[in-house]
Image (cartoon, grey):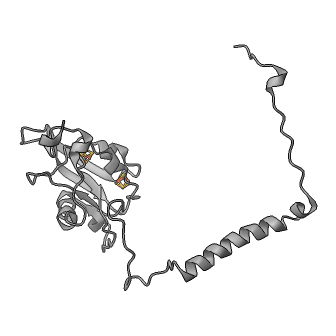
Amino acid sequence: MSLDWKQTDIVFVDQPALGAAERLYLPQIWGGMKTTLRHMFKKALRDRTVVQYPEQERPLRVEIYRGVHRLNRDEDGRVACVACFMCETACPAHCIHIEGAESPWADREKYPIKFDIDELRCIYCGMCEEACPVDAIELTPEFKLVGKSREEMIFDKEKLLMVYEQTKNLKPRKDPAITGYPETGHRDRVP
Ligand code: SF4
Ligand code: SF4
């Protein structure tokens, strides 16, 4: 491969010379401090960031908050998951474990007979939710997660479906028709 360039193609950029004040770095330090102090006083006077939890709580952005997982049910009340393993594959923390089986329903091939998420190992990145083609797995605004043992923090299918029942009014299931998967969700709205 030949390098087809001319000397005139090269632009030399001279390093700007620093003045005496700039060599001391004091103007730059003062400029930075001014910005820090401005934000500090603005926050302290107008926009208080400290809340007295648990008596006070911040308002959560329900649609985007990434808390405890849930497994959604479809419009017929069945688990919406089709056991495609996309979430398990995408999970960087390897905390999802699924066992699929032949589905008893005509509109899908498989469904999960076992679906576990280790909530302690999870880093709440949301990759599982992004990967799911039928919007069956979602993260909820529920963040008060406590348990007395590690085993208790491994959420199985029943527990994940229970979280759906507890949070479905606060955050309704996303419309799976958006994903274009025709066999689940609101089939009549898929083009
Ligand atoms: S939120 Fe991230 S780490 Fe947690 S289960 Fe989903 S993909 Fe894995
Ligand atoms: S990506 Fe969705 S449909 Fe596939 S296994 Fe995970 S939850 Fe089930």
**Residue 165 vertical placement versus 42 (above, below):** above
- 60 with respect to 189 (left or right): right
Ligand 1 rendered quadrant: bottom left
The residue sitting at 73% across, 13% down in the picture is: 2
The quadrant of the rendering that contains the C terminus is: top left
Pick out the residue farthest to the right: 20
Image position of 70 with respect to 106: above or below: below
Quarter occupied by the N terminus: top right
Indicate whether 74 appears above or below 48.
above
Q: List x then y, in percent, for residue 133.
A: 26, 42
Pinpoint residue 6: horizontal percent, then vertical percent. 81, 19
The answer to which image quadrant residue 40 occupies is bottom right
| Residue located at (22% from left, 46% from top) | 176
Q: Is residue 102 visible?
A: no
Residue 8 in picture, x, y percent from top left: 83, 23
Whether residue 137 appears in this view of the structure is: yes
Front in this rendered view, residue 175 or 38: 38
